[in-house]
Image: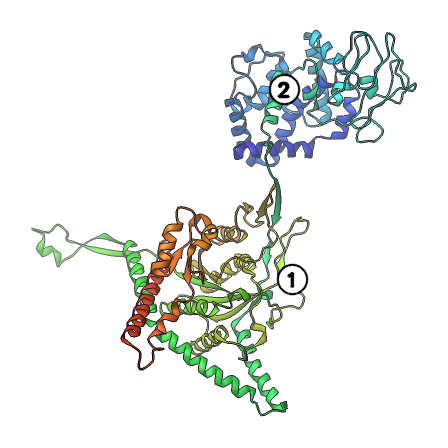
Amino acid sequence: MSNSMYDMLVAHEVSHALNTPFDEWDAEIQTVENVGAFMQVANVVEDARIERMIKQRYPGVRKDFSRAYGELHASDLFELAGKDVAEMNLIDRLNIEFKLGLFGHVQVPFSQDEQQYVTRMANTQTFAEVVELAKELLADWELNNPQEAQQNQSGQGQGQDGQDQDGQGQDGQGQSDSGQGQGQDGQGQDGQGQEDQDGQGQGQGDSPMETTNIDDINGNNENGENGENAVKADGEDGVGSYDYDDYANNSGGLPSETQTAFEQSKRNQIDENGKHRDYHTLPSSMNLDEIIIDHKAINKIWEDHVVSLRDRDAVADTSYEYEKAFLETKLEIDGKCDSFLNSKKAVVNHMVSQFMMKQSADVDRRTSIAKSGVLDTTAMMSYRWNEDIFQSNQVVSDGKNHGMVFFLDWSGSMGGIIQDTVEQLLILTEFCNKVNIPFEVYAFSDRDDLNTSDDSTEDAPQFNTKEGVSNQITPHTFSLLNFISSKMNRKEYRTAVRRLYMLATSRYGVSTPSGFGLGCTPLNEAIVTAFDLVPRFQEETGVQIVNAVFLTDGEGHGMGVRPGWQCEAWVHDPVTKKDYLNSFKETNLYLEILKDRTGCNTIGIFLSQQRSMNSLRYSYFTDDDIAGACASWKKSNYAVASEEKTGYDECYIIKANILDDVTAMDSLDEDASYAKIKNAFAKAANTTKTNKIIATKMIDVFASTLSK
């Protein structure tokens, strides 16, 4: 089913729900004799009214109606093939006119006398006008087709021998006062719809239209007495309730062949294997001031931690000095951090050179040379052999400037690889500093007790929702720790880098602020927050292109958008008004929305301790890509995830321990053998090569948006 067909059918039914008064519909059914025929004719007229009303209310569906009815006509769902439309009865031609003729799919002829019905049908405003026109059209059809009309009426439950039959309702059987329903020629039976040879009706009706006599509907028996055999629907007393297209089950002739074919075709469109859809709505916005703990607040938490250690020393009964131990440990780790950064200068410089080359190539692409029309007096001397004697202007069109937003997974599952991940992050921040790219580093944590910002309000929600929205997605409470920022001066940056390195390398017994401990994985919440964070970052820095880099070890915990065996899970974005199907991973879904909402470039960096990529094949690789991924993992210590398996523009899976090989030479003993020295050198060289390969690929991604 095409999107236009789906939208047309939904709009049609929505308009019925909005504009068709079903109480009045049921009431009118009780006043007519030929119920099935009346329901069909009234539905033809009502369809024209409600489709006109929904197109007026939502003009965007006009194209959907035109395309969908064109598809139905092309498939001959109205069964017009081989038929002369001019020979069809008036009701059929009116039906075709307002479903196909309006859009130019079919030319429908009408006589001068019939034109009044076309005009009235095109201008019905109320349901009462629909009923009035439908009764006139039905009367005209019954006058011209008396045999079919009589067949339709007799099929409503009236026996041929005039028996008074008990009609059967939807949930139970009606009986006469005597319980027997005795007729003139025989004894009526419950649920009669056919007669046997002895004149005694017997059978089970399939629907109210097949089993219900109109007198029984009105609550009167054959003699006009008010009986107890009124049809009961859903176990309640009173007249049964009919849908507007229940005539399709009616026995006997019906006035409109095209409407009968159309209703049957709609039933054939039903997907028996279709799944139920659960729709979830994203928050309208995230309260960034309640989520982000900025770098100034982070600095204060560290300073308060040192003060708390000093206070602890003042009241301690032991000779152990907490502040002194902390400062000594910090000094040692600061040295390791500086050593690491020095060892990575070659990689950072390689990234810078690659980026500058890409940038220069981009400038060259944006450079054009135009003739000024002014004579170059110097070049005029060579006019005999050189036609280029005019001055030229070199014009360089404006390029795009970049910014980086890094999201660091600060969860317990990162414990074994947090140091490797932070070291990869610091290489990227060093690169950003070298080329003056604005950036922010946020660690997403489930800790929500650290926000001391003046803009934060106690008990304020972290997200906003619209009233009346059902099935609202509720992000878990979490925080974004702004560990490093390009807003920092040189001294603040170096201090922040060392502190982050200390958190990443700390082991048991090392004192750090308790609020910075690893917890759960609010990755999905971080992505949803980026919907608002990225535009604010662009506004504050003036950058046009943002690269959102997520450093994590896998998927985040879900926010309730889970598909089931017979259920599809859809997410509605209240900002873009788009709906998204969660077909594989919830995280991929939010990444897709992030790109649609902000236009940013998304990069995933997954540090893995796996020995082989086979263990990740179903999560990150297709069958066609797994062999190449395994080969890249073995040779170069990294692999690129398949595009179909990830929501990132690029997702790099990097071996977690490769950075340790860089210091292999430093850890050699003085009396190390030649073989050990050779192996250590090979590992270090291979690691440097791997880092440069990864760096080059990431620069390709960063630079790919230069000309956007």
Residue 706 shows in the view: no
Please state which amino acid type lies under the numbered disc 2: Thr
| Residue 607 sits above or below residue 155 on the image | below
Q: Earlier in the sequence, mark 1 or mark 2?
A: 2
Q: 149 or 216, which is in the foreground?
A: 216
Provide residue 445's location: percent of width, then percent of height: 56, 66
Name the residue: 79% across, 11% down: 159
Q: Quadrant of residue 658?
A: bottom left
Q: Quadrant of residue 53?
A: top right
Looking at the image, residue 418 sits to the left or right of residue 513; the answer is left
In terms of secondary structure, where does tag 1 sit? loop
Provide residue 14's location: percent of width, then percent of height: 65, 34
Provide residue 229's location: percent of width, then percent of height: 86, 22
Q: Disc 2 designates what residue?
A: 260
Q: Disc 1 designates what residue?
A: 461
In terms of secondary structure, where does tag 2 sit? helix
Number of marks in the rendered image: 2
- Mark 1: few/some/many CA within 10 Å (<14, 14-19, 20+): few
Kindly report the distance in space between the C-alpha atoms of the residues bearing marks 1 and 2: 55 Å
Looking at the image, residue 693 sits to the left or right of residue 212; the answer is left
Provide residue 708's location: percent of width, then percent of height: 38, 53
- Mark 2: few/some/many CA within 10 Å (<14, 14-19, 20+): some
